[in-house]
Image (cartoon, rainbow, N blue to C red):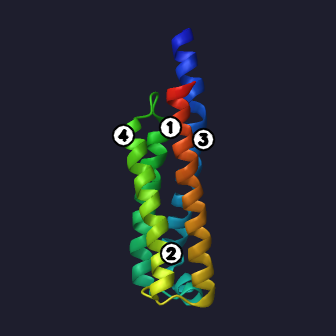
Amino acid sequence: MSTALTVTADRMKFLRLALAADAVVTGGNGLVYLAFAGPVSDLLGPGAGLLRGIGAFLLVYGAAVGLLATRRAISPAATRAVIALNIVWTLGSVAAVVTGAADLTTIGAIWTIAQALVVGVFAELQIVGLRKTRNN
């Protein structure tokens, strides 16, 4: 590997890890929602149909984020899109709890806030990783 590629790969390492972790957690969450929509619905509150839809979205989104993480050169524009979607997800999750729109149980509200925090942390890590690709 040439020196230029080594430097680029080193600069991408943190961002790649942040994206990969996001992909694994998001995809895993999507699989659980799809495979166990009924029991998860009973626990969290939203209907099984809604959870299946969310699960399908999360599975596709997780796969897309995972694919981005595997690229030799990670697209800054695609990374910014992931960050933006993570922020929207975080804010939407908080709004769902505050407004009561999702018919969440108490456990569902706690879960929703907890996962919003995780997604917010992924967004922050991705922002830091994107900055590292430009500043090192």
Q: Position of residue 16 (x, y in %)?
A: 55, 38
CA distance separating discs 3 and 4? 17 Å
**Would you identify the image quadrant in which residue 50 lies?**
bottom left
Q: Earlier in the sequence, mark 1 or mark 4?
A: 4
Q: Which amino acid is tagged 4?
A: Ala
Q: Earlier in the sequence, mark 3 or mark 4?
A: 3
- Residue wearing tag 1: 130
CB-based contact (under 8 Å), mark 1 and mark 4: no
- Residue wearing tag 3: 17
Q: Which amino acid is tagged 3?
A: Leu
Q: Earlier in the sequence, mark 2 or mark 3?
A: 3
Residue sitting farthest toward the top: 2
- Residue wearing tag 2: 94
Q: Earlier in the sequence, mark 4 or mark 2?
A: 4
Front-most of residues 135 and 61: 135
Mark seen at residue 77: 4
Q: Residue at x 52, y 35 (%)?
A: 131
Q: In the rendered image, is residue 111 in sight?
A: yes
